[in-house]
Amino acid sequence: MSNEEAALWIKDPLAILAEDAARGIIVKAGRIVELVPAGRSPQAADAQVFEAGAHVVLPGLINTHHHFYQTLTRAVPEALNRELFPWLEALYPIWARLTPEVLDLGITVAMAELLLSGCTTTTDHHYVFPAGLENSVDIEVAAAKRLGLRVLLTRGSMNLSRRDGGLPPGSVVQDEDTILADSERVVRRYHENGEAAMVQIALAPCSPFSVTTSLMKSTAVLAERLRVRLHTHLAETEDENRYCQDVHRCRPLDYLENCGWLTDRVWLAHGIHFDDAEIERLARAGTTVSHCPCSNQALASGTCPVCAMEQAGVRVGIGVDGSASNDSSNLMQEVRAAFLLQRSRYGVTAVSHRDALRWATKGSAACVGRTDIGEIAVGKLADIALFKVDELRFSGSGDPLAALVLCGAHRADRVMVGGRWVVENGEIPQLDLSALIQRHSAAAHKLQRLR
Ligand SMILES: [Zn+2]
């Protein structure tokens, strides 16, 4: 819809993930203003019509964890078949060679993949800042604006190199003062407060084994002062547990709390290795968790106890994680992966396709700290994803909503962000995908020194 003031009726969908909206929804000025129940006509009589009879309509999916630059290092030969720590050690030297132009290609590929998979809001955790890449967040903001994707970008950081007992080499870390100054710069420059924000910034030291305690603490203080969210990796592997015991003489969650991070400002990536008492502490604090099922399976990190967390009151969202460990940025496929993994852990009756869709929408909205997205309801932003079920993989399916998850939907036909179509007929307008693939592939191979 080009004119955002005119009302648009997404009419008579094949199926829709919303209560009392069998005849569709009315979108106006970037928001959902009316749900049209079965047997009724909309109150907005003059609305333009989009015939949705072939579409399953979902709230736009929200991606709560990613590292966009990693689309440049998918299936890297040296990193294959390695667990997290040696996997990282194989990749850090490659990431140290990133340049602004190459990073822009990596970001654009990640965002395009996300959009085409039905994602309307994404986070990104960018934490490698080799010399020359100081403006990484600026490059990300520009790409998000170009593509029309809603974002919560994090200013990530690492300041604990191998020399000081950390994991990364010195070439990809910065010092604490530089990190804090740039964190404040990007928040003041780009962070939009309040409802309907298109660009928000959070702060995100990388992990206990790549960041000093001092930086963890000072980042929490800065986030409090600037009123922005906080993000980090936690409880991802047994290696990390051992590292925390050896270095900090406590478990990762204790360490987090000691750093002033056990709050409702924080969402954590992975959250696999928490015991019951720790899950209770997360729930009490209002800390949320991003479940990344593909990455966790690929690196054999373990399985996030999603149902136990939800039962305790912890809100859980879905993240694709970096494209070097997934190695895909397809959020709809991540929903299916979460459905399968959690069902295998908790049983058939405990996990339905609707649960998995809820994690990737309402649950993810809690992770990014927003109440204006994640749901098709009156007053929410018009962020929606429309899928067709006419591909071979869906042939003969009964329940269209269940079919998206069970048959493996992977490409949205249409995606709307804030009332604006950003994907139409399975394509992103003004983005030449084949040219992008060609340039991105060439840049990635050069970066990996493969060609
Ligand atoms: Zn990650």
Image: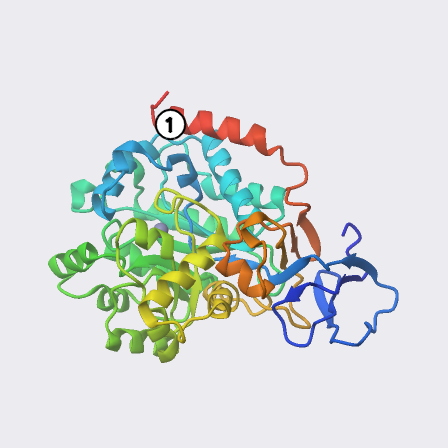
Q: Position of residue 13 (x, y in %)?
A: 70, 63
Residue type at mark 1: give it. Leu
Residue found 26% across the figure and 33% down from its top: 78
Question: In the picture provided, is 351 more to the left or to the right than 216?
Answer: right
Q: Position of residue 106 (x, y in %)?
A: 47, 37
Residue under label 1: 447
Question: In the picture provided, is 237 more to the left or to the right than 96?
Answer: left
Q: Is residue 154 visible?
A: yes
Q: Is residue 2 above or below residue 403?
A: above
Q: Is residue 71 above or below residue 56?
A: above
Q: Is residue 244 above or below residue 79?
A: below
Depth order, front residue of 222/309? 309
Mark 1 lies on a secondary structure that is helix
Q: Is residue 5 visible?
A: no
Question: In the picture provided, is 58 more to the left or to the right than 157?
Answer: right
Residue found 83% across the figure and 74% down from its top: 43
Q: Residue 7 appears in which quarter of the rendering?
A: bottom right
Q: Residue 396 appears in which quarter of the rendering?
A: bottom right
